[in-house]
Image: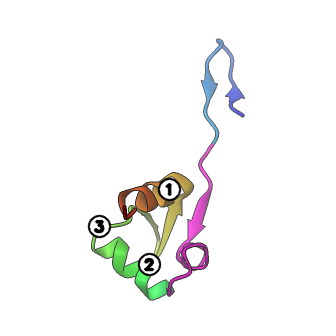
């Protein structure tokens, strides 16, 4: 759901961010592996202070890019 602002424009909803621990749980891998994938640029993330945050779209893209046939 987007937020309406005066003038008829709208602000899209903010993405949901996951911590490296949450991503590790979702992918059933070690949190260290998640951090290594981020540093190797295999998984996109946003750094907030000393911590990384990953959006659901970034997780989906990672899974899509790493599918096997």
- Residue 54, percent from left and from top: 50, 63
Q: Residue furthest front?
A: 69
**SS for tag 3?**
loop
Using a 10 Å C-alpha cutoff, classify the residue at mark 2 as few (fewer than 14 neighbours), some (14 to 19) or many (20 or more).
many
- Residue 57, percent from left and from top: 51, 51
Q: Are marks 2 and 1 in contact (CB under 8 Å)?
A: no
Residue drawn at point x = 44 percent, y = 87 percent: 32
Mark 2 or mark 3: name the one nearer the start of the chain.
Answer: 2
Q: Residue furthest top?
A: 7
What is the basis of the colouring in this image? rainbow
Q: Which mark is residue 2?
A: none
Q: Is residue 19 magenta?
A: yes
What are the residue bounds of the magenta stretch? Answer: 14-30
**SS for tag 1?**
helix
- Residue 50, percent from left and from top: 45, 77
- Residue 22, percent from left and from top: 61, 74
In space, the residues marked 2 and 3 are separated at their CA atoms by 11 Å
Residue drawn at point x = 61 percent, y = 45 percent: 14
**Horizontal side of residue 41 vs 61, given as left or right:** left
**SS for tag 2?**
helix
In space, the residues marked 3 and 1 are separated at their CA atoms by 15 Å
Give the residue number, with chain letter if any, for mark 2: 34
Q: Which mark is residue 41?
A: 3
Using a 10 Å C-alpha cutoff, classify the residue at mark 1 as few (fewer than 14 neighbours), some (14 to 19) or many (20 or more).
few
Quadrant for the C terminus, please: bottom left
Quadrant for the N terminus, please: top right
In space, the residues marked 2 and 1 are separated at their CA atoms by 14 Å
Q: Which mark is residue 60?
A: 1
Decide: is 19 above or below 62. below
């Amino acid at each position: 759901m987007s937020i309406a602002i005066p003038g008829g424009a709208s602000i899209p909803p903010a993405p949901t961010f996951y911590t490296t621990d949450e991503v590790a749980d979702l992918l059933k891998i070690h949190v260290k592996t998640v951090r290594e994938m981020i540093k190797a640029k295999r998984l996109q993330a946003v750094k907030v202070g000393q911590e990384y945050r990953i959006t659901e779209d970034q997780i989906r893209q990672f899974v899509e890019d790493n599918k096997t046939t």
